[in-house]
Amino acid sequence: MHESFVSNPSFFKLDATLKKIKNYWQKSFDARGLDITVDQWLLIENLYKHKRITHNELAKLTSKDITTVSRIIELLVRKVLVERQGSTDDRRKVFLQLTPEGVNKYREVRPLVLEMREIGWKNLTEGDFQEMTRILDVIYSNIP
């Protein structure tokens, strides 16, 4: 491996970019009085897409640890955006799903999220997006 791979500040740039994006999104959420965090949005979006899933499935989909997911879900339950339902087959299994209020929150926030994603991708091509995704997938799979 070339020295440039090891000494290159790309990981710092990636980390700094992700922090900047998250801060921008949170400020945009707060400015519109949406009363959710970026991490809460990530779970809401995945619950909307997958309808009814377990804590473990949600943790895998969002690359978050189960403790973090449980903490965020508890906050969303208190906000009446998510509900828990026990499995009829296995009493230990609990399913999560959006409440009608949660679906409304998803529909309220989604247009802003799409707008913010467009801002981030301005001046980039579909090819740029595909190449970046490919590179990030390789890096992700390299990390044990």
Image: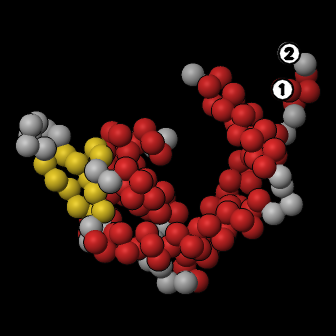
Colour pattern: secondary structure
Q: Residues within 10 Å of mark 1 (few under 14, many from 20)?
A: few
State the residue at coordinates (31%, 74%): 101
- Viewport quadrant of the C terminus: top right
The percent position of residue 46, horizontal first and vertical second, equals 43, 53
State the residue at coordinates (47%, 77%): 108
Mark 1 or 2: in front is 2
Q: Is residue 95 above or below residue 137?
A: below
Question: Which mark, by number, is residue 1?
Answer: 2
Name the N-terminal-most of marks 1 and 2. 2
The answer to which image quadrant residue 10 occupies is top right
Q: Is residue 101 left or right of residue 89?
A: right
Residue picked out by circle 1: 6
Q: Mark 1 near mark 2, Cβ–Cβ under 8 Å?
A: yes
Question: Which mark, by number, is residue 60?
Answer: none
Q: Secondary structure at mark 1?
A: helix
State the residue at coordinates (84%, 55%): 124
CA–CA distance in space, label 1 to label 2: 8 Å
Front in this rendered view, residue 143 or 125: 125
Q: How many marks?
A: 2
Q: Is residue 140 above or below residue 3?
A: below
The percent position of residue 82, horizontal first and vertical second, equals 28, 63
| Residue 79 visible within the image | no
Q: Is residue 53 left or right of residue 119?
A: left
Task: Give the amino acid at mark 2.
Answer: Met
